[in-house]
Image (tube, helix red, strand yellow):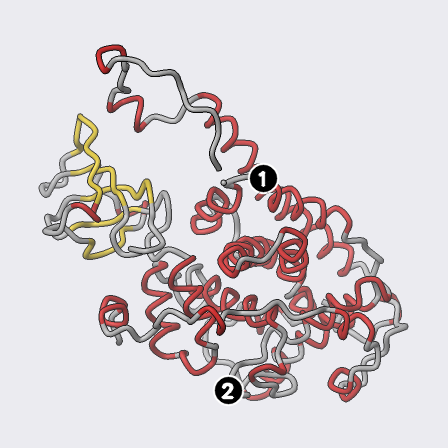
Amino acid sequence: MVRLSDLIKQAKLPEKKQDEEIKIRNLENLREDSDAAKTKREGLSHSEEISKMNLPTEARGGVLPDKISLENISLPSEEELTTPSAEELEKQKRIGNLYARLYDFVKEISNSLKRKEKFTIEKGLEIVKNIVHTEDATNILYGKAVQSKGLPDNLAVHSANVCIYSLILGKGVGYPQETLIELGIVALLHDLGMIFIPNEIVNKKGKLTTSEWKQLRKHPSYTYKILQTLGEKYLWIAKVAFQEQERENGQGYPNGLKGDEIHDYAKIIGIVDVYEALTHNRPQRNGYMPHDAVKLILGTQKDLFSQDVKRLLLTKLSCFPLGSYVKLNSKAVGKVIEVYEEAPLRPTVELLYDSQNRRLQNKKIIKLTEAPLLCITDAVREADLPQ
């Protein structure tokens, strides 16, 4: 398997020139074209109600400070530098609650759909707006999404995680806030059609049969049917979500779209959908560590995604996320406390255990960008930490 470090050294993903940057495509064509040819081929009615669906049952200069002598400068202690303030902890808790709200929102919609009842998305829009308008929200929520402690690996978790990851990539593109909100709500709703895929297919541990695979591939159409019941105002959401399984080389589904035929939002959602699935447990396998998932996508699925979104994945979704545990070549184990976009493989680590797996009594912070002899050799699951 291709090594991530080799990809970086060999410059397999070069920086884009300014005139080649990703462009935000206007949504007006999607909003206005209510009879799009590709959705028309699927025979999807824009007037169906859920109750009638034929679905299976189941930052500038300011005022300078006054001059003071060096003797009067009070420097913070190491403890103060590494321990979050009460205010910071409260902020993290408040932002963390947004994850639970995303989860509950998708769960509520799922329950409504199973009862073939109508639903609204205004609550979901408010949650996404709150995340977009809150400083550092996506960074804090990223850590929660990677771990998802105490929650089952279900549709609600998957949808919340894909929403968070998509917002991180959208910010990497430079999308303005209103565009981020659009991206976020589509990401949150992109997989609703999975509700109507039989559980025996979704939870199957073995390889799917041809018939089961054909059934699974219907979920974008189910998602479209569900979302078009929201009416003309939100029809563009249905149309973008319908493309989330399309791929850059035309090998996706349901319509085999390629390149610029696929909306930019769908391209972003498509790659983080795969990343999310790889990093979490599935019936047939345990989840990959984030850096392994990135290596897998860049190594074996590289032709399925554009250079733009692959670069975003590599630079914006850190290989070693905040709060994750890592092992160094010194055999010490630590926790990632700061990451750097320009050096994704060399974060700042707080050492927790020495090379003999003994718990350290005093805090020791290693900034790997300033420690050339040290490097990360592996990621460590929390459950595998020394006892």
Disc number placed over residue 249 in the picture, else none: 2
Q: Residue at x 52, y 61 (%)?
A: 173
The answer to which quarter of the image holds residue 336 is top left
- Residue 334, image x and y in percent? 23, 42
Of 48 and 10, nearer the camera is 10
Left or right: residue 30 compared with residue 1: right
Disc number placed over residue 207 in the picture, else none: none
- Residue 247, image x and y in percent? 54, 81
Report helix, strand or loop for mark 1: loop
367 over 2 or under it: above or below: above
Which amino acid does the dot numbered 2 rest on?
Asn
Q: Residue at x 20, y 54 (%)?
A: 376
Of 282 and 298, nearer the camera is 298
Q: In the picture, which quadrant includes the C terminus?
A: top left
144 over 318 or under it: above or below: above
In the displayed orientation, state which residue is furthest to the top.
72
177 over 59 or under it: above or below: below
- Residue 167, image x and y in percent? 55, 55
Disc number placed over residue 134 in the picture, else none: 1
Eye-nearest disc, 1 or 2: 1
The answer to which quarter of the image holds residue 217 is bottom right
Left or right: residue 150 compared with residue 265: left
